[in-house]
Amino acid sequence: MLNNEQQALAEKLGILLADSALPEMIKEAIIQNLYKIPDDKVAELVRVLETEQGKLNSLVADLQKFFQVQKSSWAETEKKQSSVAADLEQEIVKELSSEVTQ
């Protein structure tokens, strides 16, 4: 039987494992053998999984910013290319018009 502290730690571990990138086989082994793992190792595992989750959240946030910047940059590049293409088209039309009128 688990005491309140162990129960809370086990619940926290379950939540962290659910979100973890660990292979399912490892997660299942941890859960099935949780009662065999010393309390200090369970606490360490929770800390490691919290760190993993924090780093993954940070990476996801950084990637979202990166993709937003890329999207914005591509939109700006597309706009510039359209402008250059329109200017080039006008130059060609002018040149052809002047050749036709001569």
Image (cartoon, rainbow, N blue to C red):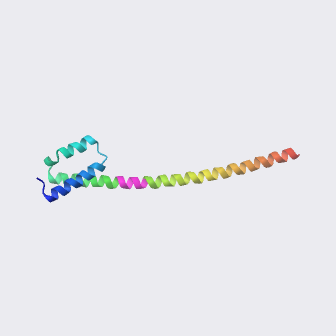
**Residue 60's x, y, as percent?**
40, 53
**Residue 53's x, y, as percent?**
32, 53
Q: Residue at x 28, y 55 (%)?
A: 50
The residue sitting at the left extreme is: 1
The residue sitting at the bottom extreme is: 4
Residue 56 falls left or right of residue 94: left
Residue 63 falls left or right of residue 77: left
Magenta segment, principal secondary structure? Answer: helix
Q: Residue at x 70, y 50 (%)?
A: 86
Residue 30 falls left or right of residue 72: left
Q: Residue at x 24, y 44 (%)?
A: 27
**Residue 38's x, y, as percent?**
14, 51
Q: Which residues are magenta?
A: 56-62
How many badges with numbers are in the image?
0
Q: Residue at x 14, y 48 (%)?
A: 35
The residue sitting at the right extreme is: 102
**Residue 75's x, y, as percent?**
57, 52
Magenta stretch: residue 14 in it?
no
The residue sitting at the top extreme is: 25
31 vs 71, nearest the viewer:
31
Magenta stretch: residue 61 in it?
yes
